Image (cartoon, coloured by chain):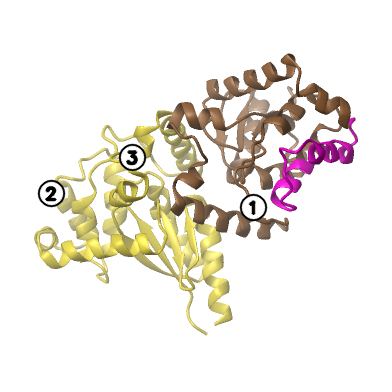
Chain colours: A brown, B yellow
């Protein structure tokens, strides 16, 4: 039997990706599903698919007002701290490059969670190298090497390729989950359904 | 103790309102919550809030493709039949007027479900008086009286007022749920959370 696997696509600026990132590891372990953490940038998808140059939550304030209340309510239900950031969305390019460069390294997942906490609990500026360096260090990585990697053509290209792959797979929001058999699930509230699908489709192979 | 109550806001053209309408009565009974069925029109809200003259699922095809797959998957999970309608969205004005006029009558809820089945299972044209008349008759109402009511100024105005109330309450999509203490929940996947909130907030009063 193939071991079940699920891709977890996230953007560090995405509010609903925060609770998903904090709870996915325990949920996946419980479901017996391996995770592939896939950082990408949502901005280019909003631009190409919906002609949006800003978050839809800023462009459409009624949706935005609901989203902030909804995320606060959800986090309270999960027992997660949450504070509305003073700037939204924060540019997630540099953080995403670090995460892409860290793929397969043992501090990557802890770094991802550290950045989400920095953004959505401590309201730190995740565009700042010093803030990101601390997230890398807290996760057990090498801050200088991680920051240097963000300026290499290889890492820049890898993030562009990931975002193009997200578009090809039909993504239009974050968080999203993609199963090995190509099934797409969008939203923190689809996490359990995506894990169940991944586990079932692995049973069939 | 005040008996818990939840408003269920729906549009007959809204795909995600279909599974919500089919399962809300059993879920509310289980949670001990009374329901207030609130028909409204989503179109005017899309127009005023997002400058959209069509469903966002048509305007943004990537989101649309996902939505059809997601609704089919959800309905399969709930054990509900579902067939993608040949026309989307179908104009829900006349059906909504009948539902508004039927408020408080014992056939209203059954009529609502009949219209959803007509639209999302049998692909009938819910703009057609003959189709709506059959839905009224199947639900136990008087088709001639129900259709006549849709042409009265009183009923037209009542639906306009409902849609304006929806906007005032912060709605931007359907289905939506509003508690007595003003808490808004959006989406079929928030039904259980909304019912739990309604039950808890009634306990506190």
Label 2 chain ID: B
Between residue A77 and residue B117, name the one nearer to us: A77
Classed neighbour count for the residue bearing mark 3: other residues with Cα under 10 Å, few (<14), some (14–19), many (≥20): some
Residue B55, horizontal then vertical, whole percent: 33, 40
Callout 3 secondary element = loop
Q: Decide if residue B151 is in sight here.
A: yes
Position of residue B83 in the picture relative to residue A15 (left or right):
left
Residue that extends furthest to the bottom in the rendered view of this protein: B1
The residue located at (61%, 59%) in the rendering is A73
The residue located at (42%, 57%) in the rendering is B176
Residue at which label 3 appears: B55
Specify whether disc 1 shares its chain with disc 3: no
Nearest to viewer (mark 1 / mark 3): 1
Among numbered discs 2 and 3, the one appearing first in the sequence: 3
Position of residue A170 in the picture relative to residue A112 (left or right):
left
| B106 is higher (above) or lower (below) than A178 | below
Name the dominant secondary structure of the magenta segment.
helix
Rounded to the nearest angstrom, the CA distance separating label 1 from label 3 is: 32 Å
Callout 1 secondary element = loop
Label 1 chain ID: A
User: Is the Cβ of the residue at disc 2 closer than 8 Å to that at disc 3?
Assistant: no
Callout 2 secondary element = helix
The residue located at (67%, 27%) in the rendering is A203
Residue at which label 1 appears: A86
The residue located at (71%, 46%) in the rendering is A119
Residue at which label 2 appears: B129
Rounded to the nearest angstrom, the CA distance separating label 1 from label 2 is: 52 Å
Residue stretch rendered in magenta on the structure: A113-142
| B11 is higher (above) or lower (below) than B72 | below
Residue A193, horizontal then vertical, whole percent: 60, 40
Rounded to the nearest angstrom, the CA distance separating label 2 from label 3 is: 23 Å
Between residue A178 and residue B108, name the one nearer to us: A178
């Amino acid at each position: 039997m193939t071991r079940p696997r699920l891709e977890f696509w996230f953007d560090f600026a995405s509010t609903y990706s925060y609770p998903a990132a904090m709870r996915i590891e325990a949920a996946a372990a419980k479901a017996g599903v391996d995770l592939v953490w896939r950082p990408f940038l949502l901005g280019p998808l909003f631009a190409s698919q919906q002609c949006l140059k800003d978050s839809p939550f800023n462009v459409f304030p009624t949706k935005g007002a609901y989203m902030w209340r909804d995320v606060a309510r959800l986090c309270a239900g999960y027992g997660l701290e949450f504070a509305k950031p003073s700037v939204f969305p924060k540019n997630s390019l540099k953080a995403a490059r670090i995460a892409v460069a860290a793929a397969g390294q043992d501090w990557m997942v802890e770094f991802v969670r550290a950045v989400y906490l920095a953004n959505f609990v401590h309201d730190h500026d995740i565009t700042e190298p010093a803030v990101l360096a601390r997230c890398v260090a807290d996760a057990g990585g090498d801050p200088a090497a991680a920051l240097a990697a963000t300026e290499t053509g290889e890492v820049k290209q890898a993030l562009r390729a990931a975002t193009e792959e997200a578009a090809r797979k039909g993504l239009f929001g974050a968080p999203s989950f993609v199963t090995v058999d190509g099934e797409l699930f969008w939203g923190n509230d689809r996490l359990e359904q995506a894990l169940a699908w991944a586990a079932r489709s692995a049973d069939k192979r």
